[in-house]
Image (spheres, grey):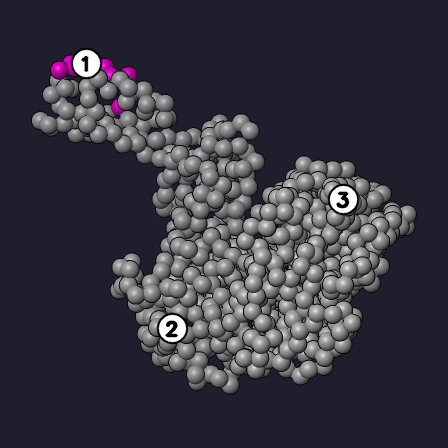
Amino acid sequence: MEKTLYTVNVYSENTVGILNQVTNVFTRRQVNIESLTVSRSAIPGVHKYTITAETDEETISKMVRQIERRIDVLKAFYYVDDEIIFQEIALYKISTDRVLEHGALEQVVRRYNARILELNRNYTVIEQTGHVEEIQQLYEELQPLGILQFVRSGRISITKSPIERLSDFLAEMEAKRQASEQV
Amino acid sequence: MSEKINGAEALMRCFKEENVTTIFGYPGGFIIPVFDALYSYQKEFDCILTRHEQGAIHAAQGYARVTGRPGVVIVTSGPAATNVITGLADAMMDSTPLVVITGQSIVAQLGTDSFQETDVIGITQPVSKWSYQIRRAEDLPWAVARAFYIAREGRPGPVVLDLTKDAQTQLFDFEYKKCRFIRSYQPNPTPDPNDLSLAADLINLAKRPMAVIGQGVMLGHAEKELYAFLEKADIPAASTLLGLSIMADDYPLNMGMVGMHGNVAPNRKTGECDVLIAIGCRFSDRVTGDINTYAANANIIHFDIDPSELNKNVRVFLPVLGNVKETLPAVTKLLKPARHTEWIAGFKTYKEQEEKEVISRDLHPEGPEITMAETVKCISDQSGRRAVLVADVGQNEMTSARYFSAGPGRQFVASGGLGTMGFCLPAAVGAALGAPDSEIYAVCGDGGIQMTIQELGTIMQYQLPVKVVVLNNNFLGMVRQWQELFWDKRYSSTRMQNPDFVQLAASYHIAGRRVEKREELSEAVQQMIDHKGPYLLEVHVEEEGMVYPMIPAGQPISDIIMGRTDTK
């Protein structure tokens, strides 16, 4: 089966131990998580997980349903890159002496639309946001200078579709809650 | 109107609110406060002290399976919690509602490897529907209400509450509110009307329809809806292992059991039907055999309540999401009355073949040794109408499924998905408590009974009228069968030297008898049935008996082996 990089979005209640349940689904099928970002969503009390993994569509669709089956998970979706706007962030730490020796860092920073976050006698920290390839390219460009530290975040993403499936789901469940209280 | 009580007392009141009557338990250090509270509630709850925590959870499973109500288990932390893992995994696979309370260390010591501390949430999450640690008494009523709701609603399953010592002893203002809604959980998803009408269209057009009935029909209390559905469109139906005891054996549309050791007719007809209607089952690999050839000529319609089951194992033509209690009658309404006389008559040819090549050999063997089939058939024929057979795992289970006539109404209990040896004896304890008006037969092998044989102690202490039938072949029979068929008769670690089971029972003051001759079988079975109270019947069955028919694992259903001559 052909493998594709999928982005999985999971929305859950903010309770302890959900991450474990989500990653268990990946572990059980031996699908490696490429990146993982967890944070609060815009909706109070709802947490959002963004996970990327390479697999085939049949596997990812079953995994998403099994994630959704966990009681505290509200909804889970999967997307290919065309369906989402996504971004990563990376930080590069380089010795300031080497930066000064290089002389042309300004051009590099401009070309990559990166920025300098910190500059002191000892080191310089550059920040870059973009897709994984862009971050990798800058890494390779800076490598001759000797990168002291490098870190990249997991992916975050937003869907292109005009339909807001989570909001629709929450509205539907709110109607069910009201109905259940009338019983 | 609230008053300050401690968490342990609160738990008792929660149980009363949830109509709990029976609890299976085993005390220990970090659950003593709860057992102390139980001491004051002896009139309200029967607390059954098993001999092992695994026994407690299997007993609760047996109880849940015969009553349809959640089985309740209370054990301590650490080793007790790890001892219930097998039962949780079993209940998860077989959709059995359980509420399992495990004691836990004091909050301040969590994560420090304190005495009898285990990461219960971490290890139970993959094998339970929901697991939650209660750290403060004030969270207890909310968590217990939620636990019962989750265990029971939608597709049932086991729930774990990890109850810290702090939460058991803290005083708080108790108030109980039953859980009726969880925002992130839809137990009864709304059916799509398009799916329902499409399903009806497909069935109306079918020339050779066939239904496969799983436990979902029982869990959804949709037996009557099922009969109406089958009868209106004249659809022959077969059960999965856990779907047994939904249709009566003599129900005209009941064609038997599908699966690895199922009946020939429904298995063969799976390949011939043009529409296969799977109702509340999950297409276990033991049912489908080779997925790629399964029901190759059929459009498959799958009715299920759990969206994650749809298109999981078998890619289906039409998934119908929803509670079968709701979806079946909705589709029935749209069905045109039909007759499939010729198609149904076609099952008979295969039935006769099985009768001749398998069943008659099993029931009327040429050799002097008793067969498992004869024994089970004897029990089935001589027992009363309200008999529940609790099987263990392996040849005893498959033989029981094949030869015990389980009438409609939760009369057959077995560990299906997980295949847990040792399930039978403790599950029979639970079944006896859950169905006190039924005769309870615990049919196990010499291997399985020894995995949980300590539960004879529980049967003794509560004088539970469990009739234990040990089908003793001095082998781990099913593994030996595979070794004979597929591993060149290399009987690696399957020969077993056994104790005297009758004497063993006697030391528990349980009456018993050993049978070695066919002439004594019927009379010995009758003696067991007539005996008031617990009884153990050890039947020496042929050592190298086989369960046929058999579809080898992963092979097409059409590769049915009918007997030893097929394998030469």
Residue at 29% from the left image edge and 60% from the top image edge: B113
Compared with B53, B186 (above or below) is above
Residue at 26% from the left image edge and 64% from the top image edge: B108
In the rendered structure, the answer to whether residue B85 lies left or right of residue B290 reads: left
The alpha-carbon separation of the residues under discs 1 and 3 comes to 81 Å
Q: Earlier in the sequence, mark 3 or mark 2?
A: 2
In the rendered structure, the answer to whether residue B130 lies left or right of residue B374 reads: left
Q: Toward which corner of the image does residue B83 lie, by quadrant?
A: bottom left
- The quarter of the image holding the C terminus of chain B is top right
> Where does residue A173 sit, x and y in percent of width and height?
53, 53
Q: Is residue B96 visible?
A: no
**Residue receiving disc 1:** A104
Which amino acid is tagged 3?
Asp
Which amino acid is tagged 1?
Ala
Count of marks, rendered view: 3
Which amino acid is tagged 2?
Gly
Q: Is residue A153 magenta?
A: no
Q: Nearer the viewer, mark 3 or mark 2?
A: 3
**Residue receiving disc 3:** B566
Secondary structure state at the residue bearing disc 1? loop
In the rendered structure, the answer to whether residue B113 lies left or right of residue B426 reads: left
> Where does residue A172 sit, x and y in percent of width and height?
54, 51
> Where does residue B550 sit, x and y in percent of width and height?
71, 48
Compared with B115, B331 (above or below) is above
- Labels 1 and 2 share a subunit: no
> In the orientation shown, which residue stands out farthest toward the left?
A121
Magenta residue span: A101-114
In the rendered structure, the answer to whether residue B275 lies left or right of residue B446 reads: right
**Residue receiving disc 2:** B28
Residues tagged 1 and 3 counted as in contact (Cβ below 8 A): no
Residue at 57% from the left image edge and 55% from the top image edge: B494
Q: Is residue B533 visible?
A: yes
